[in-house]
Image (cartoon, rainbow, N blue to C red):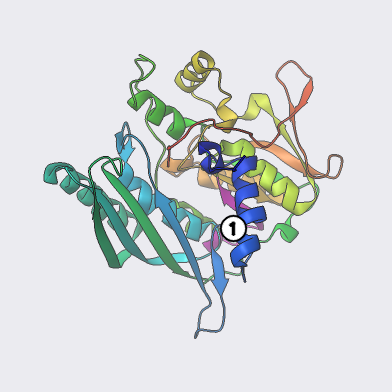
């Protein structure tokens, strides 16, 4: 039987990682790492630069707290800044479906402009294509971003050591839940808003203040569970997290319970995992809580040698369980 691409191959979990590592990269090869947020290009002048690219296919294209325009800018900016690169400029590729109303396109473009201005980046080139009716969900967007590496921090798993603390800058699962509710498929009445937001102001301030940051990674598809598993697998260390310390909005928890989902696996678009040396964790937490996008930050766990390549969660009742990489299709088309 011929194997075919399934929605699970784009959901951020085991199947997506297998598709990239075992199929795509095996054929085309890669001079980079394959799954880093951005790749560094050295020796181009006074600064090394970083480059990232991403495509956005969210359905619906507008949801509480954001839209595909805000999402495409914030997502690309965040991939650059967590890699230690100051975002400078972006490309913008639009694939428009026949029948898209100019009024709706204008709203998306204004959102793109507003978010780019907020993040301090320029859109310097782009491309536009139109496809037949039903060939796309109104609009797909691709963005490529360039940033300069102006800090000593580099996104390297080898920086992480046992004893380091794990900080999450706010509530988990907001974006994926907001998109699910916006689809109107489950007759759920909720005011949950997406957390989509450019985080470069927050992270630049952290890096400017010389905190001993070991690793930063934004949590998107697959939620914080996937991000933590990627860190554990690539660092060859164990991560222990505490269920009672992970902030989750009551509305998000309620919707996830109705749908049989775990908020740890639900997508975010304005959240990062920050790993820092234990002696500076409290100081960093106090510092970032002054930022609106980090006011609900918590220390949610620590790195150890006891469970190599695994994420273990201490539950609220005192037990422990493995938090594995998600498998299958959880939330299709959320970013």
Above-or-below relation of 246 to 112? above
Q: Is residue 1 left or right of residue 71?
A: right
Give coordinates of residue 39: x percent, y percent.
Answer: 56, 67
Q: Which of 17 and 315 is in front in this view?
A: 17
Query: Which span is picked out in magenta?
Result: 207-218
Q: In this view, does 121 lie to the left or right of 217?
A: left
Q: Which residue lies furthest to the front in this view?
A: 1
Taking the spot 62% from the left edge, 57% from the top edge, the residue there is 211
Q: In which quarter of the image is the C terminus?
A: top left
Q: In which quarter of the image is the N terminus?
A: top right
Give coordinates of residue 255: x percent, y percent.
Answer: 47, 18
- Whether residue 278 is visible here, answered yes or no, is no
Q: Which of 294 and 143 is in front in this view?
A: 143
In the rendered image, residue 210 lying in the magenta stretch gets the answer yes
Taking the spot 38% from the left edge, 44% from the top edge, the residue there is 57
Above-or-below relation of 260 to 48? above
Asked which quadrant contains residue 282, the reply is top right
Neighbours of disc 1 within 10 Å: few (<14), some (14-19), many (20+): few
Taking the spot 39% from the left edge, 31% from the top edge, the residue there is 179
In the rendered image, residue 145 lying in the magenta stretch gets the answer no
Q: In this view, does 10 lie to the left or right of 72?
A: right
- Report which residue position mark 1 lands on: 24
- Whether residue 47 is visible here, answered yes or no, is yes
């Amino acid at each position: 039987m011929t194997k075919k691409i399934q929605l699970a191959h784009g959901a951020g979990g085991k199947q997506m990682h297998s598709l990239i590592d075992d199929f795509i990269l095996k054929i085309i090869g890669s001079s980079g790492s394959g799954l880093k947020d951005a790749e560094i290009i050295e020796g181009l002048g006074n600064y090394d630069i970083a480059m990232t690219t991403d495509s956005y296919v969210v359905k619906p294209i507008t949801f509480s707290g954001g839209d595909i325009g805000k999402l495409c800018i914030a997502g690309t900016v965040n991939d650059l800044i967590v890699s230690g690169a100051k975002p400078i400029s972006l490309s913008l590729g639009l694939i428009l479906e026949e029948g898209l109303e100019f009024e709706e396109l204008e709203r998306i473009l204004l959102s793109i402009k507003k978010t780019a201005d907020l993040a301090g980046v320029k859109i310097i080139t782009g491309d536009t294509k139109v496809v037949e009716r039903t060939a796309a969900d109104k609009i797909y967007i691709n963005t490529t971003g360039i940033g300069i590496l102006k800090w000593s921090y580099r996104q390297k798993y080898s920086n992480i050591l046992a004893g380091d603390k794990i900080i999450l800058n706010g509530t988990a699962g907001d974006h994926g839940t907001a998109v699910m509710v916006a689809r109107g498929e489950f007759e759920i009445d909720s005011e949950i808003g997406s957390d989509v937001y450019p985080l470069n102001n927050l992270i630049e301030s952290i890096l400017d203040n010389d905190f001993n940051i070991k690793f930063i990674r934004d949590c998107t598809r697959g939620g914080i569970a996937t991000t933590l598993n990627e860190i554990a697998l690539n660092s060859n260390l164990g991560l222990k997290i505490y269920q009672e310390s992970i902030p989750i909005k009551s509305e998000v928890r309620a919707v996830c319970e109705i749908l049989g989902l775990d908020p740890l696996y639900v997508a975010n678009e304005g959240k990062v995992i920050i790993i820092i040396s234990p002696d500076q964790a409290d100081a960093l937490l106090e510092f970032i809580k002054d930022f609106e996008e980090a006011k609900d930050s918590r220390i949610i766990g620590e790195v150890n040698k006891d469970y190599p390549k695994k994420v273990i969660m201490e539950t609220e009742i005192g037990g422990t369980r493995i938090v594995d990489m998600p498998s299958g299709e959880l939330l299709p088309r959320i970013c």
